[in-house]
Amino acid sequence: MEFVELAKSRRSAINFQSDVKITVSELQEIFEIVKTHPSSYNLQTTHYYVATSEEKKAQVKAASFNQHKTLSASATIIVCGDREGYKKAPDLYESMKLLGIIVECEYKETIETIKNLYENNPTLIEEDNIRNACLSAMLFMLAAKDKGWDTCPMHVKNVDLIKNIYNIPENHEPVLMITIGKSDEKIRPRGYRKPIGEFVHFVD
């Protein structure tokens, strides 16, 4: 699918065909594309927790104010940011050094910069985790559409309960939920979109 067509055809599904299943292999094909998403200092702090069983999705529905699409979706996914992700910088950049992408002095300088930037700065960690997760999630939804799947981004309700359902570790903080499946309805006409002049501001 051409990119312009892809971007315009991606819509938030209202509900899903509950009898449609998605396989791990099909999800992995999407995630192979998602792993190319940009992230602050290439720290790749975004993690995905995927529920496909009816039992698990039913628990998610109960924790999400009974929003039916969390159950009818082929998979209900929690997108998280890792509060300790910056600590993995040495391992990530070590591979770049071994590949000759950076030299030793660049490696040491980058690791020190990352440490000084994020250590004892929980506000920046949270902000960057949200930015990283949203960039990753948008790519997930586009990649899913390219593979013929529909999606809907959603708020995460009852965070503590959701973390327990998905067995999400303490340092992984939910940012948003994505439901994926095959839409069960005709797509409604797209809602009003602001003209470019209302949201783009040329400053020179």
Image (tube, helix red, strand yellow):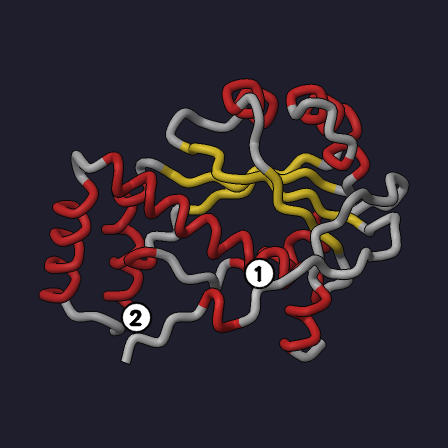
Q: Is residue 132 visible?
A: yes
Is 133 positioned to the left or the right of 127 in the image?
Answer: right
Seen in the picture, residue 120 relative to 55 is either above or below; the reply is: below
* Residue position for label 2: 99
Residue 62 appears at what percent x and percent y?
71, 20
* Residue position for label 1: 32
Point out the image quarter for the C terminus. Answer: bottom left
Point out the image quarter for the N terminus. Answer: bottom right
Q: Nearer the viewer, mark 2 or mark 1?
A: 1
Residue plotted at (31% across, 55% down)? 92
Residue 134 appears at what percent x and percent y?
48, 51
Residue 82 appears at what percent x and percent y?
38, 39
- Provide the secondary structure element on which disc 2 rests: loop
Looking at marks 2 and 1 on the same chain, the residue that comes earlier in the sequence is marked by 1
Which mark is drawn over residue 170?
none
Residue 86 appears at what percent x and percent y?
27, 45
Is 107 positioned to the left or the right of 101 in the image?
Answer: left
Seen in the picture, residue 87 relative to 147 is either above or below; the reply is: above
| Marks 2 & 1, CB-CB < 8 Å contact | no
Seen in the picture, residue 31 relative to 45 is either above or below; the reply is: below
Distance from Cα at disc 2 to Cα at disc 1: 21 Å
Across the whole image, how many numbered discs are drawn on residues? 2
Is 14 positioned to the left or the right of 76 in the image?
Answer: right
Amino acid at circle 2: Leu
Q: Is residue 25 visible?
A: no
Amino acid at circle 1: Glu
Is 173 positioned to the left or the right of 127 in the image?
Answer: right
Q: Nearer the viewer, residue 122 or 190?
A: 190
